Image (cartoon, coloured by chain):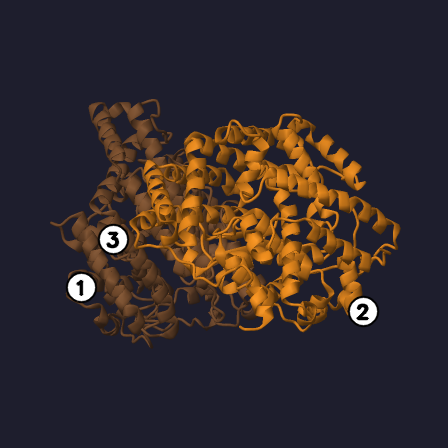
Chain colours: A orange, B brown
Amino acid sequence: MTTMTNQAANRGAAQDAIAFTLDAPEISTLFELTRELSDLNAAASLQSWDQQTQMAMGSNMVRAPQMATLRAVIHERQSAPSLGQAIDAAEKALAAAPDRFTVADHALAREARRGYDHAIRLPTSFVRDFSDATSAAWEAWMSAKAAKDFSTFAAPLARVVDLCRLRAELLDPQADPYAVLFDLYEPGLSLAECGAALERVREATVPLLKRIQQATPIDDTPLRGDFSDDGEMTLSRVMLEIIGYQFKNGRLDLSAHPFTTSIGSPYDVRVTTRLDRRNMVRALLPAMHEGGHALYELGVDPALCRTILGHGTSLGIHESQSRFWENVVGRAEPFWQAHYHHVQAVFPQPFKDVPVAAFVRALNRVKPDFIRVEADELTYNLHIIIRFELEQDLIHGALEVKDLPTAWNKKYHDYLGVDPTDDAVGVMQDIHWSHGSFGYFSTYSLGNLFAAQFAATMRAVFPDMDERLARGETSFLREWQRENIHRWGKTWLSNELSQRITGEPLNPDHFISYVTAKFERLYGLKN
Amino acid sequence: MTTMTNQAANRGAAQDAIAFTLDAPEISTLFELTRELSDLNAAASLQSWDQQTQMAMGSNMVRAPQMATLRAVIHERQSAPSLGQAIDAAEKALAAAPDRFTVADHALAREARRGYDHAIRLPTSFVRDFSDATSAAWEAWMSAKAAKDFSTFAAPLARVVDLCRLRAELLDPQADPYAVLFDLYEPGLSLAECGAALERVREATVPLLKRIQQATPIDDTPLRGDFSDDGEMTLSRVMLEIIGYQFKNGRLDLSAHPFTTSIGSPYDVRVTTRLDRRNMVRALLPAMHEGGHALYELGVDPALCRTILGHGTSLGIHESQSRFWENVVGRAEPFWQAHYHHVQAVFPQPFKDVPVAAFVRALNRVKPDFIRVEADELTYNLHIIIRFELEQDLIHGALEVKDLPTAWNKKYHDYLGVDPTDDAVGVMQDIHWSHGSFGYFSTYSLGNLFAAQFAATMRAVFPDMDERLARGETSFLREWQRENIHRWGKTWLSNELSQRITGEPLNPDHFISYVTAKFERLYGLKN
């Protein structure tokens, strides 16, 4: 541990143990009360995971109100006066002698305060309404998407939008309601910072995309074929194991929209993926993406297990971990030099005659299209910017839900030059709005930006990163992430964490440099 | 609906609608409070189902305390003074004007009282300890059974026995502790009634078994073969569909010990089975057994959905429904005359050359063995009587857990003339004790007795039952059960229900007549 490399690897992230000062009654009381919340939330996570992966459809009519009951009980305890008093006492003790306490103690009080303040501002009746409305909207979304008919989704979605507006007003009647919603997902930086970064990305993306569209297109027909479900699941499992996902602490299932759930601890973190018979990459990359999320949750320090700090610190940082494994690693030639043989072994047709370089080029084709989750690394952020703008219009009342498909299609036409063929692959392609997650989408782009920013630091720490990837190594990257990011859970907020690791807060230039260099090389563009 | 048959079908069971008097505030308050309990218990059921069917083993170390937290919260609400006051108020209103209220109202107050009185007698600390201890014992049982080593299970099991004794003392310090535990599972009849019935069964079984053992043995080699997992699962699904299980409201999974779980409503009732490569009947009959349980839960009246009355009324009655489909139907030749072709289609080897009569004879071979779940209909109750006696000795302190394997093996030798080859197939064959379910096993035999008693009534109602089964009909039986048993949920206690349906409380003579006639015929015994 005396080389420059290892010193740099730990820059800013002290090797200190994570622990709570449980012999201080102000901390132990708060610890116990919030542990109960963590465990009850784990039960709610399981209900949700089961609803999306295992439950028969005929059961949803009762699952929705059952989930609402549990959420109402959680809300009641999350807003209990006894919790408020415990937080007050902890804050007082921390303020009186800050150095007597650990960073985990301070973070525990901060997160408990945040959760409590939110809860006391949202009455139980609101929580129950929100739960009922989002369960109904999710079910409507499933049916409407299958029928390619937005009209049956419009009313349940409008109800969710109304409740999101109400939520923002209840939380902070003075602030921009959209900023309040954004803060639910990314408390570590402001909506203004996010907006400015997205604007910088848009300004850099549009001209680069234009240059690419004038170059010789990349052929992605090598990725097409007729792929068995079993083969895609096998390959997804293999890739998850390669990046270090632990099946002894989780499982892989199928769901309409891939997702990762921690069932309340780093010992039970489950991922899902989907299948695509024509294009196995559409199953494989989501699995690696969710695997990246899962590594974060699995890597949380045992000391934070079953505590409210025991999850990723923000959605932007979470997404940086999934994007790193999906894109920075999963679309990089050195990685596939080591692992492409698995693809060829599972699917000799069509891959036995496709060289690794052609496979990787196909993985990186840039082509504006209308499905977000299949977008390339460059155009992806334009999908997010569209949602970011539409959400603000919806929440600010400048756009009505019934007009959403038209507005959606217009922006896709204007920004990406594509026209969704129907609403199932247009405005209803994503599950998020049915869940009431307004303010959430921008964290996907924040993930791209943080991923590139962290990767720049990792390249400085590991100048031989590509060579090691090409030799089949992945654990050095995962270990670095675990030490610097994963194990801390919610100890640090996103910009704090970025500052500790990279020496600066969110900076979109790293992403812009990364995609510019990558696509200039791939498309043979002149500088 | 004017024939004698249909009138008889409804004997005692009025066609009245099931409803609550929700415009009476005493009822509606109690209804809401107990609805919350029902929903929270559904979340706990899901945790348990997931633990046994989906969860990775590495997650159990956190699932156990997470489950304990939820159970403690449920217990807190189950013993809340506000619930006690609501029950008092409801009881007062019901007593003042009993005829103003429905049978559902009366049953709601009765079940709420029962749950509340139990809860206030069991402190939260006990509930948490019990949950921790049984989770630990379950995990230890899994490992110990795999290793065929009782010694690692002994300490966790002894802890569970101690807590069961404590539970009985807390619930009723004056009563026989084993009677108190028995009442947890079968509140509708007394331990004395149960003991007397089992004694009658033992007295009839022993001489009948002796006569059978002197007759020409039945050959069950037709059931042996090499059966694929997929084939067994396919056949299990087919049989579940034939008896009327609804996959749109449930699912079939694998687990170490087959079980049925209602996730809190008749719209989500899940079954599990197990596989056996050498003997497909060991997968098939458990599936039909669990399917019988599931039909009960699926058949509960919608008015009882998400209420504390929305489940089967007792374990004995529940088991009567599973035994009916597993044994009275699932081992009967008329049923297989209609459905054996499915078995032959899935497994042409070995069944294409086995006539249906030989298949059914093999299904009904009587042979004392040491595995309860594989026992024939006749010797099955001896397995239960052994557990019934050992449990009483354990709870009364006449037997120590460390001496349990020796006592177990001695009774198997004395009662059944068999010697378990190791503790995995001996004392550790069943999951129940690890769950702390002392007092439970005897309800399996009560199920056999009630199944035969109800079947006798059904035969009177449907004199052409065998002919209809042979034509492939099953719904007439299921509809009769639904109307007379299933839809009522917990409205009636077990002996009340029996009285309504059959005109008498539990009477073991029906079972004795049934097995005597059946095995005299199968073994060609003289009277």
Which secondary structure lies at badge 1?
A: helix
Q: Amino acid at mark 2?
A: Asp
- Would residue B129 appear left or right of A10 to someone viewing this image? left
Tell me the CA gap for discs 1 and 3: 25 Å
Q: Amino acid at mark 3?
A: Pro
B304 shown above or below A21:
above
**Residue occupying image coordinates x 47% and y 39%:** A62
Q: Chain of mark 3?
A: B
A90 shown above or below A322:
above
Horizontal and vertical percent position of residue A403: 69, 28
Q: Which residue is mark 2?
A: A353
Horizontal and vertical percent position of residue B503: 26, 41
Q: Which residue is mark 1?
A: B393
* Lower sequence index among marks 1 and 3: 1
Which secondary structure lies at badge 3?
A: loop
Q: Which residue is mark 3?
A: B508
